[in-house]
Amino acid sequence: MALFARPFVKPKFPIHPGHPERICWGCEHFCPADDMRCGNGTERAQHPIELWGEGWTQIGLDADRGNPPSADTSSPNAAD
């Protein structure tokens, strides 16, 4: 007799899906675009590759921090 149930294992998020336009990426259900179960809105959530292109993994919080943004804090409206 099992004392503990198996924990829910979240499916891995695909980095380069074959046809991202066929799936809603808004939650963990990954529903077909024409049959969304979660009610996540009237339109499907797009995969990041559709929004930012092939290099989407290099953008954002988990991106490589080799080239930090410029530290220029000057404002065009700053008084001299």
Image (cartoon, rainbow, N blue to C red):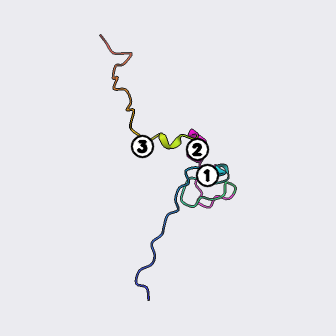
Tell me where residue 3 sits by quadrant. Answer: bottom left
Q: Which mark is residue 77?
A: none
The reply to whether dot 2 and dot 1 touch (C-beta < 8 Å) is yes
Residue receiving disc 2: 49
Which residues, given as a range, are shown in magenta?
35-53
Q: Residues within 10 Å of mark 3 (few under 14, many from 20)?
A: few
The answer to if 66 sits in the magenta stretch is no
Residue type beneath disc 1: Pro
Does dot 1 land on a helix, a strand or a loop?
A: loop
The reply to whether dot 3 and dot 2 touch (C-beta < 8 Å) is no
Residue receiving disc 3: 61
Q: Earlier in the sequence, mark 3 or mark 2?
A: 2
Toward the viewer: 75 or 63?
A: 63
Real-space Cα distance between discs 2 and 1?
Answer: 9 Å
The answer to if 41 sits in the magenta stretch is yes
> Which residue is located at x 62 percent, y 50 percent?
44
Quadrant holding the C terminus: top left
Side of 4 relative to 30 (left or right): left
Side of 13 relative to 43 (left or right): left
Residue receiving disc 1: 17
> Which residue is located at x 58 percent, y 44 percent?
49
> Which residue is located at x 34 percent, y 19 percent?
74
Residue type beneath disc 3: Leu
Residue 22 position in % (x across, y down): 67, 53
The image shows a total of numbered marks equal to 3
